[in-house]
Amino acid sequence: MAGQQQDYILRQIELLGRFAARLRRKGKPLDDKDRLELNETLLLALHLQEQNFGMPAAKFLSLTADEQVAALRKGESTADGQARCLVYATILKETAVLYAFRDNEDLALGARQLALYLALSLALEPPTDGRAVHALIDELRADLGEAGLHAPTRELLGQFEQSRPA
């Protein structure tokens, strides 16, 4: 991924996070202005995903998780491919918070599950930015808990736990 584009996406992810933090502080219910901003922020999140993938949402959303990872890594060095996957997982984590404020719990859960799957995949494949990935895993696990994880995610979580130093 070109450095400028990645920097842009990372700055925009910070905006997603700040907006989500503001909503957390405010709590529910949201007023009309907040709901409008929430919808605009969700559109920004989708736009960032399109930028990261380099393709329209309709195309990458039709892919399986493993196909999405392959698409993000295609033509990239190992480090750049991992960075794109970490960016995607981070966008999904922030998007999940926004979905939850919109009372779209199923979408929030799906975004968190996919983000955790991606983060666990990265953690099990060195070299990777271990600190950032482990922090993301810890945040997502706190949000999701252990119950209700999809089988592939549970399997990766088990592998991850076995690979961690005691």
Image (cartoon, rainbow, N blue to C red):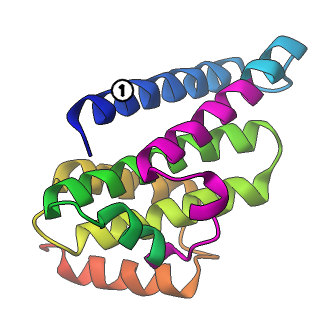
Q: How many marks?
A: 1
Residue 7 image position (x, y, % from top left): 29, 29
Dominant secondary structure, magenta: helix
- Quadrant for residue 2, please give it: top left
Location of residue 13 with respect to 133 vertically, above or below: above
Query: Can I make out residue 31 in this image?
Result: yes
Q: Nearer the viewer, residue 162 or 97?
A: 97
3 with respect to 24 (left or right): left
117 with respect to 5 (left or right): right
Query: Can I make out residue 128 in this image?
Result: no
Does the magenta portion include 65? yes
Residue positioned most to the top: 33
- Quadrant for residue 9, please give it: top left
- Quadrant for residue 95, please give it: top right
Residue at 56% over, 66% down: 113
- Pointer 1 residue: 8
Residue 29 image position (x, y, % from top left): 86, 24
Location of residue 41 with respect to 49 vertically, above or below: above
Kind of residue at disc 1 = Tyr
Residue 33 image position (x, y, % from top left): 83, 12
Label 1 crowd bin: few (<14), some (14–19), many (20+), radius 10 Å: few
24 with respect to 125 (left or right): right
Residue at 37% over, 58% down: 137
Q: Nearer the viewer, residue 43 or 32?
A: 43
Q: Nearer the viewer, residue 2 or 110?
A: 2
- Label 1 element class: helix
The magenta region covers: 38-66
Residue at 23% over, 75% down: 124
Residue at 28% over, 55% down: 133
Residue positioned most to the right: 32
Q: Which image quarter holds the C terminus?
A: bottom left
Residue 101 image position (x, y, % from top left): 75, 36
